[in-house]
Image: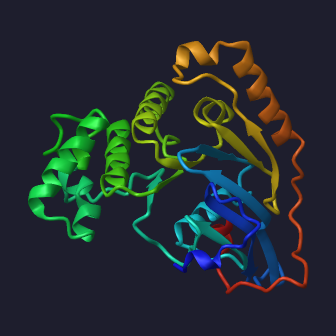
Amino acid sequence: MGTSKDIPKQITTDAKIVVKDINRIFHLKKSKTEPARDFIALQDINLEVKKGEFLVLVGPSGCGKSTLLDILAGLAHPTSGVVYIDGKRVTGPALDRGIVLQGYALFPWRTVRQNVEFGLEIKKVPKGERKGISDHFIKLVGLDGFADRFPHELSGGMKQRVAIARALAYDPEVLLMDEPFAAVDAQTRESLQDELLRIWEETRKTIIFVTHSIEEAAFLGDRVAVLTANPGTLREIVKIDLPRPRHNSDIRSSAQFGWIRHKIWELLQNSPHEPKVHPQSLPVADAISPTAAL
């Protein structure tokens, strides 16, 4: 990380997260059918997220949403540009960020409680304290009574609840969520959306949430950042002026929700779709598989 001296003076002081001039370019190796070329995943991304805000990222497949989340998490480095959290430059993974993925990523040999306590073990929290913390978050995600179950004994929705509890248990400042509900059925998905909003309203974590679903974006977010197709650029940020707390049945049937959903849909429909070669002035990243940019 760095020090607060790293942050430019022109950045607003109330921003929890600052994404400044982010570009990510992948150098695709030559194949039998195609010459070597450079693939732009992200281009000139500038974004500020306030403390406690729920920001949703949407965009066409392959626009770099997950790549941007990886950069925020410190799991990947931009070709150029910087990310700051609380004025400190992000240079790698850290415990101030929790990550929830689509594939749960639970340890199959660990119980629900042991999975939830994993981050606490890394932080070297004493065993006696870990139980009290894990009890709290297991109850928070609605899995009271399942602490001693193993992942194979749980439904998909329950596994995702465990993943959320694990990410929250070590008290990160920011929660990064990459299509966490994409693998579950529609009814479970709506239930998990309600659950996530309830948890967010209680904890007020800063959340950045990636999704392909326009409805999910409009329902969850304070703002929705719409990305274009390759190269992934920030097309527009839509403010979601829907009252909170939100309930699925009330919000989704409202005219205001329909207008917001249509606004996001229009932005996505009018998004350019042709991949472009990056400007020669930008540095080229290390060679990497093209699928990593998607």
Q: Residue 139: horizontal and vertical position, in percent?
A: 24, 36
Q: Is residue 230 left or right of residue 145?
A: right
Quadrant position of residue 250: top right
Q: Residue 278: horizontal and vertical position, in percent?
A: 87, 75
For the residue pair 293 and 51, the one nearer the viewer reads as 51
Task: Write the residue at 61% across / 22% down.
Answer: 243
Q: Is any part of residue 294 visible from this angle?
A: no
Vertical comparison of 218 with 180: above or below: above
For the residue pair 150 and 90, the one nearer the viewer reads as 90
Task: Write the residue at 40% across / 41% down.
Answer: 203
Vertical comparison of 122 with 174: above or below: below
Task: Write the residue at 39% across / 66% down.
Answer: 95
Q: Residue 242: horizontal and vertical position, in percent?
A: 65, 24
Q: Residue 30: horizontal and vertical position, in percent?
A: 77, 85
Q: In this view, does 261 lie to the left or right of 103?
A: right
Task: Write the residue at 46% across / 28% down.
Answer: 194
For the residue pair 130 and 4, the one nearer the viewer reads as 4
Colour treatment of the image: rainbow
**Which residue ends up furthest to the left in the rendered image?**
128
Q: Is residue 60 left or right of residue 106?
A: right
Q: In which quarter of the image is the C terminus?
A: bottom right
* Tag count: 0
Q: Is any part of residue 176 visible from this angle?
A: yes
Vertical comparison of 163 with 216: above or below: below
